[in-house]
Image (tube, rainbow, N blue to C red):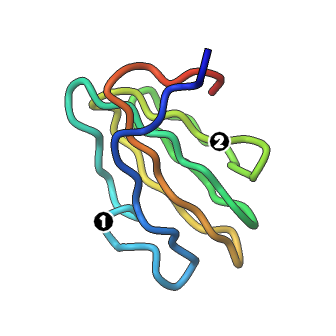
Amino acid sequence: MAARAPYRSTPVFDQDTLPAALRARHDTKAGVWGVIRVIEGELRLSYLDPPAEVVLTPDNPGLIQPQQPHFVTPIGPMKMKVDFYDQPPEGV
């Protein structure tokens, strides 16, 4: 069975092109899951409710639940993108 494909993905951002909106508190819409995929380097994912932090790497993507407030912070040079799903993504 093929893995579900995202219905939308952001461009690839680096530490310089990462939009300010992603560095500040934001959340996904109802019924939308996000998977933050680090391509190179590291990225800190901060969840706000409940509070938690995790370091994302190419081997450790970050799952965002629908309407879950969060923000990201680059840890040095990095490249990342976000894939969006309309149902829970598999294998994350």
Type of amino acid under label 1: Ala
Residue at the farthest front position: 1
Q: Please identify the quadrant where the C terminus is shown.
A: top right
Nearest to the eye among marks 1 and 2: give it.
2
**Residue 26 percent coordinates (x, y):** 29, 50
Q: Tell me which residue sits at (44%, 67%) in the image.
A: 11
Residue 19, image quadrant: bottom left
- Residue 17 in the image: above or below residue 53: below
**Residue 69 percent coordinates (x, y):** 34, 39
Question: In the displayed structure, does residue 86 sit left or right of residue 34?
Answer: left
**Residue 72 percent coordinates (x, y):** 50, 57
SS of the residue under disc 1: helix
SS of the residue under disc 2: loop
Residue at the farthest top position: 1
Q: How many angstroms separate mark 1 from mark 2 (CA)?
A: 20 Å
Say which of 17 and 9 sits in front: 9
Q: Tell me which residue sits at (63%, 69%) in the image.
A: 79
Chain-order first, disc 1 or disc 2: 1
Residue 21 disc label: 1
Say which of 7 and 84 sits in front: 7
Type of amino acid under label 2: Pro
Q: Tell me which residue sits at (41%, 53%) in the image.
A: 9
**Residue 30 percent coordinates (x, y):** 20, 27
Question: In the displayed structure, does residue 75 sit left or right of residue 16?
Answer: right
Q: Tell me which residue sits at (64%, 59%) in the image.
A: 43
Question: In the displayed structure, does residue 14 sit left or right of residue 69?
Answer: right
> What residue sits right under mark 2 in the picture?
61
